[in-house]
Image: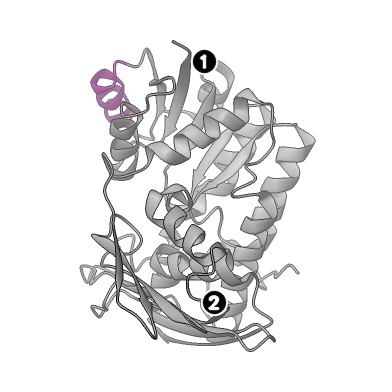
Amino acid sequence: MDTFTWGIIGPGNIATEFAEDLHLIKSAQHRVGAVLSHNLEKAAAFAEKEDAPQHFDDLNSFVENARVDAVYIATPHPLHHEETLRCLQHKIPVLCEKPLAMNSREVQEMVDASVEHNTFLMEGMWIRFLPSIGKVLSLVEGNAIGKIISIKADMSYKAPNDPEGRYFNPELGGGSLLDLGIYPVFLTHLLLGKPAIIKATARLSEKYIDEACAALFNYGNNSYAFVESSLVTETALRAAIYGETGSIHIGNPWNEKPPEIIVRPYDGADQRHPCAWEGRGLQYEAEEVARCVRQGKLYSDQLCHQFSLDLMATLDAIRQQTNIRYPADGQALAVSG
């Protein structure tokens, strides 16, 4: 059986789940071959657990010596830009956790590096490849609810009140929008595209990161969307898509493994579609990366470079309106498109 070898940068919780889900892939054997952490002992422990022959605590040594087919970057958001660029410069294909970077300028530089070095790059928006999201797309494309009129989606997690922790520390990319709000923003982009008009509001901390955030999108064609994220309240963790003839409701937690998807025609009975799969579901994005890398592609047609650029442009616009700030922005927030 064909073997696809992964490098792991940032062996934390999500990387652990990613490595576990690799074992669920049936189309080829996926394994971890190299691990990078700022802590050598942590890298060694992760490598031992996954039977990986290489581990590192230096990025330069990793990109020069790691024998891998692709790398999964799962470090805090502000590190994504540099780590991705270094991998692409050494022609190592990259799957980088969402958000791809801190702003549009950084994402554009990463996309440019992918093209320049002819090396694959994809944002780790793993839910794009979940069977649940695939079912929603097939329902919408099959005209189950007619033309979409509105979308309402939220994400929240009542985070520990630690100003130095990753949720509230701007140095670590804290804030609800980039960590949680990106999911409902992604859903609106997937179904309606890039909004024409954005109106946003937020509750900011003293360090100018958002504890809670909300935005209204208008698409100039009688469609709109409302998205919300929070680190200080608990929301419903549901997503709903309202169309001309009915609605689609993704259960809690809609961005992970919801119990079911319900189609509610306005003039008929509910149609229920149960959701179930092995693991968390990170194996589906890993499979897509392997397929694209084997075919010599620079991006996935299901989650292309332009999609990530458009997604970050919307996040930047929300941040501009609400004055959410990060060190990576420098003097001004650069917005593309």
Asked whether 105 falls inside the magenta stretch, the response is no
Q: What element carries label 2?
A: loop
Q: In this view, does 152 lie above or below 284?
A: below
Mark 2 or mark 1, earlier in chain: 1
- In the image, what residue occupies the spot 39% across and 66% down? 180
Of the two numbered discs 2 and 1 in the rendering, the one whose residue sits closer to the viewer: 2
Instruction: Check the image and tell me how it is coloured.
Output: one colour
Instruction: Look at the image and tell me whether residue 66 can be seen.
Output: yes
Q: Position of residue 56 (x, y in %)?
A: 41, 23
Measure the C-alpha gap from mark 2 to mark 1. 49 Å
Residues drawn in magenta: 39-51
Q: Is residue 123 above or below residue 28?
A: below
- The dot on residue 132 is none
- Mark 2 and mark 1 in contact? Answer it, CB < 8 Å: no
- The part of the image, by quadrant, that contains residue 328 is bottom right
Main SS, magenta residues: helix
Return the residue at label 1: 67
Q: In which quarter of the image is the N terminus?
A: top left
Q: In which quarter of the image is the C terminus?
A: bottom right
Left or right side of 18 for 48: left
Residue type highlighted by circle 1: Arg
Left or right side of 37 for 217: right
Residue type highlighted by circle 2: Gly
Return the residue at label 2: 146
Q: In this view, does 244 lie above or below 337?
A: below
